[in-house]
Amino acid sequence: MEHASIVVLAKGLTMAIGGFFPALAIGRLVSKAMESIGRNPESAGKLFVPMLLGAAFAEAIAIYALVVVFTLK
């Protein structure tokens, strides 16, 4: 395999893995928050900000994967 092929493969795998797991985490986080709000509607105000922070931190991991792809040569 040539060096260019290996780099393209590494970039593809980095984006696939770096995008899949944060998306899975955000989906589970929002699902559990909505389930909790459904069971106890008064908790919506207390859950909204931590849910958004958790989603932002999980999304940051996907952005780190994108940065890694841009730094691979």
Image (cartoon, helix red, strand yellow):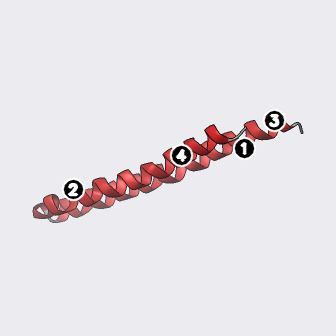
The answer to whether the residues at label 2 and label 4 have Cβ atoms under 8 Å apart is: no
Residue occupied by mark 4 = 19
Q: Amino acid at mark 1?
A: Ala
Q: Identify the element where label 4 is drawn.
A: helix
The answer to whether the residues at label 2 and label 3 have Cβ atoms under 8 Å apart is: no
The answer to whether the residues at label 1 and label 4 have Cβ atoms under 8 Å apart is: no
Q: Which mark is residue 48?
A: 2
Q: Number of numbered discs present?
A: 4
Q: Amino acid at mark 3?
A: Ser
Residue occupied by mark 1 = 10
Q: Real-space Cα distance between discs 2 and 3?
A: 44 Å
The answer to whether the residues at label 2 and label 1 have Cβ atoms under 8 Å apart is: no
Residue 51 lies in what quarter of the image? bottom left
Q: Earlier in the sequence, mark 1 or mark 4?
A: 1
Q: Amino acid at mark 4?
A: Gly
Residue 67, x across and y down, in percent: 56, 42
Q: Real-space Cα distance between discs 4 and 3?
A: 21 Å
Q: Earlier in the sequence, mark 2 or mark 3?
A: 3
Residue 58, x across and y down, in percent: 43, 54
* Label 4 Cα crowd, 10 Å radius (few <14 / some 14-19 / many 20+): some
Q: Amino acid at mark 2?
A: Phe
Quarter of the image with the C terminus is top right
Residue 11 lies in what quarter of the image? top right
